[in-house]
Amino acid sequence: KIIEYGLRQNHLHEHGRLTFNEHSNEQKQIPRFLWQMLVLVLTAYVFYVIELTINAFMHHRHNDRRHHSSFHLNDYKTPERSELPSGASSKSHGDLSIIATNTLPNLTITADERQTKSTGWMIIIGDGIHNIADGLAIGAAFSENIWFGVTTSVAIACHELPTELGEYMVLIESGFTLRRALLFNFVSACTAFIGFFIGAGAAQNEGARTWIFAITAGTFAYIALVDLWPTLMPHADKFDWVRFICVTAGYLLGVTIMLILTIFDEQIVNSSAAN
């Protein structure tokens, strides 16, 4: 609804302005809604880069902790038989093996638990950024009129309720206690108020309001592509620059081609008809 409203309002405004300019001069002018559509697709790409950066950072921390844990595990190696004190029986050697066996897995589990908890923090940060965008949309909608603001709030609430419940369960699985998971989930949800006040203040201008809707639509486009983005993420522990450059080049090239075709569509159609 936000995308439809923003494009409809902006298209009507641009259509009237371009019709007037057609009679005044023959200069080619690019409609503003095309630039806002460009902002929409670039916003989705920015969120992809943010997620890619967070994933790379988490992989780097996980590798450092795994290396650090492996370094300490070497201190718990079982002594060789020649190192056993004279008179020590094989039973004592068995005791050492039991101690080592019971100790080493605990260190490995601790490293895994830290990695899992880092995933929880990544979810909190990402959800906070997304909620700011939701707040921008709600603030801009209320600046238009109360009814539009209420319907936008209800639509976002219907989207956020199952999302927040799912994130709450993921935080618990990540090692957070019930209270801490509820607290941090609430804090990340409250970031929507930041976006609300920014959106309500900036949306007093009609032009700024449509730009806010374009950015918000980009965040929802990113969510709609949630099944596609993981295929573009590097699978190795090391950051894959070749994959990143190829994905970026392909994405931006496709956007550029579509933008050029949209700008010069009339000229292309007219030249084809003339031939």
Image (spheres, helix red, strand yellow):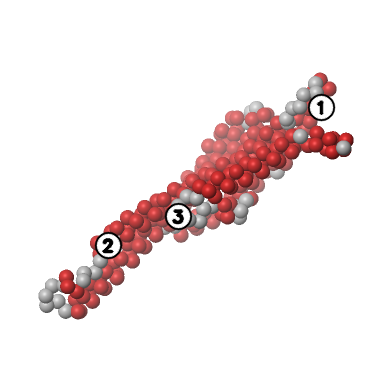
**Quadrant of the rendered structure where residue 148 is?**
top right
Q: Is residue 163 left or right of residue 96?
A: right
| Of 237 and 90, the residue lying toward us | 237
Q: CA distance from mark 2 to mark 1?
A: 77 Å
Disc 1 crowd, CA 10 A, few/some/many (<14, 14-19, 20+): few
Q: Where is mark 2, residue-wise?
A: 74
Quadrant into which the C terminus falls: top right
Residue with the most extreme front position: 275
The residue singled out by tag 3 in the image is 237
Mark 1, residue position: 19
From the image, which quarter does the N terminus lie in?
A: top right
Q: Are marks 2 and 1 in contact (CB under 8 Å)?
A: no
Q: Name the residue at 59% across, 37% down.
A: 136
Q: Position of residue 60 (x, y in %)?
A: 41, 50
Q: Amino acid at mark 3?
A: Asp
Which amino acid, mark 1?
Thr
Q: Nearer the viewer, mark 2 or mark 1?
A: 2
